[in-house]
Amino acid sequence: MSKVMIIGAGGVSNVTTQKCGLNPDVFSEILLASRTESKCKEIAARTKIPVHTAKVDADDANEVAALIKDFKPKLVINLALPYQDLAIMDGCLKTGVDYLDTANYEPKDEAKFCYKWQWDYQERFAKAGLMALLGCGFDPGVTNIYCAYAQKHHYDEINYIDIFDCNAGSHGKAFATNFNPEINIREITQRGKFWEDGQWKETDPLSVHFDFDYPTIGPKDSYLMYHEELESLVKNINGLKRIRFWMTFGQEYLTHLRVLQNVGMTRIDPVMYEGKEIVPLQFLKAVLPDPGSLAEGYTGKTCIGCVFKGKKAGKDVSRYIYNICDHAQCHTEVHAQAISYTTGVPAMIGAMMMLKNTWRGKGVFNVEQFNPDPFMEQLNIHGLPWIDTEYHATL
C-alpha cells in the first residue's frame, strides 16, 4: 500500500480520486490538493477512503515541494492544468518523488503542444533515480497503449494508424466543453497536423473531415486535428508511414466556436478592459459551464480507439481496438461524465502500475514504452473494457 498526492480538483481528479479510493490495497492514503480546497473537499466526500485535502498553488514548485515533504507520498498524480506540469515536476525532483500526468506541458502564452519541455527532464529524473510517466489519460494514454498492444500482438510493423475520438453524448447546454474550456478551445483552434512519409504536414484548423462509422454510434463527421500522442508514437512505433488523429464535433458546437473566434473571445493574448489586463479565453472559461457540472443528465456514449494497418509475417493486417463508454453509467458510478471518466480511470491504473512496480524505470517515459498487457487487463477490470477486431473499410 502507498500514499499518493493528487493535484487538481476538476472532473478528471474526481474520477481518479474515487477510483483510487476503491482500490485501498494499492492506495492506502490520499492527499488531494488544489488552488480551491473546497472543490477537494467535495471530491473527498464522495471517496470510499478518507482523503486529506490541502490548498496549493501548482505554479509554485517550492509550494508543491513543501506539501510533498509534509505528506511524504510515493507518487504525485498531476491532474492540474498543463501549464503547471513543469513546476510540479520540479517539485517532485526537489523531494525525490515519482510523477505522473495525463497531458503534456504547454506554455500559457502560446498554444503549442510539445513533449520537448518534459522530455528535457530525462537526465534529471534518471540521475535522481525517479520515474516520470507522461500522458496517462485516454488520448493520450490508452490510445498509446492500444498501439503498443497492437505492435506486440498483431504486427511486425504498423504502417498506418488513425486515432478516432467520438463523443456522441448530449449534455443539453447550448455550448459547453467536456474538459477545461481554456485547454479544449486552445487545442481545437490550432492548425491540424499529421505525420506522413517521414515529415509533419499541416492543415488549416478543422479543414479536413469525413464520416467515420463508429461502433454502436454510427457515422459521425470526424475532423483532423493535431494531438500530442502523435509526437511520441512516431518515435516508438515500428514501421510507421502515416499517423493521424480525428475528433467529432457537432455543427452547433462549431457554429458557436466560429462566432467566438470571430469576435475575439478565443484569444490568449491579454486585452485591456476597464484599466485591467484580461485574457479573453480565460474570461470565456469563467462564464461557460464547468465541465464537472455536465455529468447529471448527460446521455449517450463515447467511442475512442485506433485503426491499424500493417504487416505480420508478410501479410496485410488491419485491426481496430476501441472502447465504448456511457455517460449515464459514469454518472451513476462516480458522479462524472464519460470524458472525465475515460481520462481519470487510466490515470489511476497508471499510478497502480508504478506503485506495484509493474512499470518501472529511471527517467521520463511515455506509456507505450512499457508492456501494455497488464494495463490492458486493468482496463477491463476498472470500467473501460476494450474491443479488438478486424477492420476492413478503407481510410
Image (cartoon, rainbow, N blue to C red):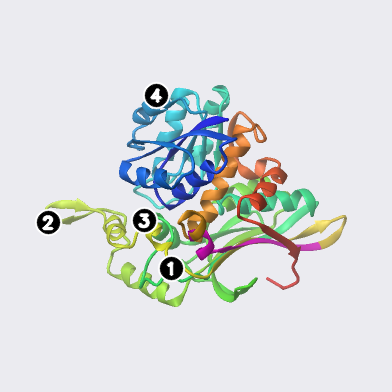
* Tags 3 and 1 touching, CB below 8 Å: no
Between 248 and 193, the one lying in front of the other is 248
Screen quadrant of the C terminus? bottom right
Q: Is residue 2 magenta?
A: no
Q: Quickly name the residue at label 1.
A: 297
Q: Quickly name the residue at label 4.
A: 70
Majority secondary structure of magenta residues = strand
- Which label is found at residue 274? 2
Q: Quickly name the residue at label 3.
A: 182
Q: Amino acid at mark 4?
A: Asp
Q: Earlier in the sequence, mark 4 or mark 2?
A: 4
The residue segment tinted magenta is 317-331
* Tally of numbered discs: 4
Q: Residues within 10 Å of mark 2 (few under 14, many from 20)?
A: few
Q: Amino acid at mark 3?
A: Glu
Which mark lies nearer to you, 4 or 3?
4
Q: Earlier in the sequence, mark 1 or mark 2?
A: 2
